[in-house]
Amino acid sequence: MTVRVLVRATPRKEDQEKFEAAYRQVTETVRGTPGHLRDELLRDGDDYILLAEWESERVFLAWEDDPAHLRMAAPMLPYWGEKGVERRIYEVRARLDSV
C-alpha cells in the first residue's frame, strides 16, 4: 500500500530561496529511486512541507536507512532551519482520482 511521507521544515527567511533551489536539486537526484513515486513542496507562510509518495513504508524506510539517502539529501541539509525536521508517514487508505 502506498504511503505519503510528510516532512515539515522552517528554513530561515534568508534561506527560503536556497531551500527551494536545493529541493529542486534533490528531487532530480531522487527521481528514479526504486519505490519513489513523486514529490511535492508545499509552503504556508514560513513553513514548508515536503510531501513524498512511496510504494510502501518498507521501501521508504530502506531508502532512508541507505547511506545514499544522506548523499542525495545533502543539498537541503543546511537549510532545514533551527526547529529541525518533523517527519510523519501516512498510509494511503482511500483516494478519489476524479470528481
Image (cartoon, rainbow, N blue to C red):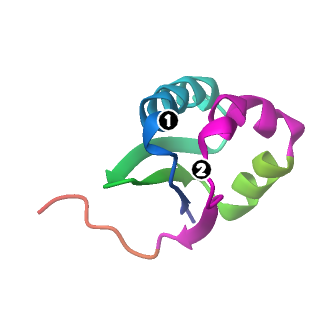
Disc number placed over residue 15 in the picture, else none? 1
Q: Tell me if residue 16 comes above or below residue 4 in the rendering.
A: above
* Residue stretch rendered in magenta on the structure: 66-92
In-front residue for pair 21/24: 21
Residue bearing mark 2: 81
Residue placed farthest to the bottom in the image?
93
Amino acid found under the numbered disc labelled 1 = Asp
Q: Position of residue 85 (x, y in %)?
A: 63, 59
Q: Where is residue 96 in the image (x, y as percent from the top left)?
A: 26, 66
Q: In which quarter of the image is the C terminus?
A: bottom left
Amino acid found under the numbered disc labelled 2 = Gly
Asked whether residue 45 is drawn in magenta, I would say no
Q: Residue at x 69, y 39 (%)?
A: 77
The residue carrying pointer 2 sits among few (fewer than 14), some (14 to 19) or many (20 or more) residues within 10 Å by Cα, namely some
SS of the residue under disc 1 = helix
SS of the residue under disc 2 = loop
Q: Tell me if residue 45 comes above or below residue 27 in the rendering.
A: below
